[in-house]
Image (tube, grey):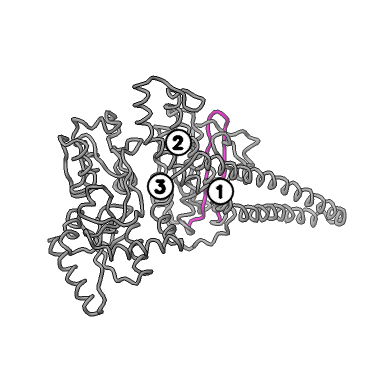
Amino acid sequence: MLAALCLLAFDNGAAFAERNHKPVVMVGGDFNYPPYEFLDKQGNPSGFNVELTRAIAEVMGLDVDIRLGPWSEMREGLDNGKIDIVQGMAYSSERTQEVDFSTPHALLYQSIWIRRDDRRIRSLEDLHGKTVIVMRDSIMQDFMAKFDPSAKLVLTDTLTDALKLLNDGRHDCALVSKLTGKYLEKELGLKRIIPVAQPIITQSYGYAVRKGNLELLDKFNEGLAVLKRSGQYQEIRGRWLGVLEPQPVSWQRVFRYVALVALPLVLILVGTVAWSRALQKQVAERTRELAREVAEKERALRELRRHQDKLVQADKLASLGILVAGVAHEINNPNGLILLNLQRFEETLRRSLPILEEYYRENGDFSLGRHNYSRLREELPHMLIETQDAARRIKRIVSELKDFARPDTADMSEFFDLNAVVQAAVRLVDKSIVKCTHHLELCYAEYLPRVRGNRQRVEQVVVNLLVNASQALEGQGKRIVVSTSFDTANHLVVLAVQDEGRGIAAEDLPRLTDPFFTTKREVGGTGLGLSVSAGIVKEHGGTLDFASVPGEGTTVTLALPAG
């Protein structure tokens, strides 16, 4: 049936070309290889490769017909001429006997996927004697045929089938690219599988044509070069791959850009504090002058002071917004380059380790820089991870600063169920909660009235409250209790998040929603999460209240008007 549909699609494409006197380029791809290429829920081609192909066709004036199907059929279509070009194929020297490759438009990091409860396989050498799942006609089938001709392979039609088999407890492992595996793991809810930490091989990934069809290949190469020069390629890549795909790095650039990011950030924070103090002095002076002028009118004076306090806060926030808008972009650019380039060092280190290990086994310990290799072999991966975590922390701080300063134009007319919002938030932070506690209790009230506002913004608040509660725990034996209810007297829908964590000192409670105030500075807190959350709750006409006993825990109560 599928073959008949593909043949009909090709015939339709040919008819279209004949009517328009312009040849249609038949572009093939895998229908289940996210986020590179896949069929979306409506059955339409989607993904990084699909958007890139359409962009190339636009700049080169080509008519393209993108068809996605089983990979083995796409390979066969390329061989028999029904497909002119495949938009995503991993490079190997063996494949160059059959096809010509374009300039690579991505890199694939192939990984070994195992079950969480079975950690026997940690490297390629551990695959000997194991049953390995691979996709039929894929680059990993070719790789295993060369690496271990006697290996016991289980062939599947799609990568989805491969990961599902492994997740169901069948066979020993699966070979799937790390980025695609992560995408499918989340999309399919596969909880039992994980990738081995280090990718086993890195492969170039790009367009491929039948051997000798260089004219068409040159057009796609030229189109790809145009997109890279214009910046459109980077935009497409950012939308689908972002910083998830490893990129090159060097130690010199890491230290250089860390310094360039850290120093302006410190100066900004110092300048913000100085600016705030200067504003406070100006406001205090103005208040004293007004007090002297209207001393005989006590009631008017109290009203004036109340409005004056609001003005102080507005001036402070406006000043902070100006500072953030002026520097966030300058911080984000070098930090983004750090994140992108860190992967080059990771790749270099990973490829160098086998050579260093062999030299270590043959010659014993030796000095590398100022340290013994026996020590560096353990410490270098941790140093890289720590540097990546530091760069991600800077990225998160900048993102939260931008969210804090950005004027909100969200649609507030949506009616939504708070129970559904809480359930979605729990799913988003499930992994973070599981790391902190084994005791999460969820109590949802029945027949809650709907709330009017912006569902996504309220979900952001709930996620922040859940993350704060889990980070406050000191041991996995402590509990988090999440409950919803309806306050009929005040017509309010209420969410309570209670934890048995370390608690908050009484003098800190009134300052919890102040910008940059945090009790978790040592673990990466920025002091913006609750400030942003308080602003969202205020926009919805609600309240956010805190009650805490140090050493016993904290309860946060979110109340929103029923719609």
Q: Residue 563: in sight, yes or no? A: no
List x then y, in percent, for residue 311. 71, 56
At x 25%, y 73%, the residue is 23
Q: Main secondary structure of the magenta part?
A: strand
List x then y, in percent, for residue 158. 21, 49
List x then y, in percent, for residue 232. 43, 62
C-alpha gap between disc 2 and disc 3: 31 Å
Q: Which residue is mark 3?
A: 244
- Which stretch is magenta? 541-563
| In front: label 1 or label 2 | 1
User: Is residue 557 found inside the magenta-colored segment of the image?
Assistant: yes
Q: Secondary structure at mark 1?
A: helix
The quadrant of the rendering that contains the N terminus is bottom left
The tag on residue 398 is: 1
Relative vertical location of residue 496 with respect to residue 353 in this rendering, above or below: below
The kind of residue tagged 1 is: Val
Q: Which residue is mark 2?
A: 480
**Contact (Cβ within 8 Å) of mark 1 with mark 2:** no
At x 73%, y 46%, the residue is 274
Relative vertical location of residue 226 with respect to residue 541 in this rendering, above or below: below
- N-terminal-most mark, 1 or 3: 3
What crowding class fits label 2: few (fewer than 14 Cα within 10 Å), some (14-19), or many (20 or more)? many
C-alpha gap between disc 1 and disc 2: 29 Å
C-alpha gap between disc 1 and disc 3: 18 Å
In this rendering, position of residue 191 left or right of residue 322: left
The kind of residue tagged 3 is: Leu
Q: Who is closer to the viewer here, 298 or 490? A: 298
**Contact (Cβ within 8 Å) of mark 1 with mark 3:** no
Q: Residue 35: in sight, yes or no? A: yes
User: Is residue 319 found inside the magenta-colored segment of the image?
Assistant: no
At x 52%, y 41%, the residue is 254
The kind of residue tagged 2 is: Ile
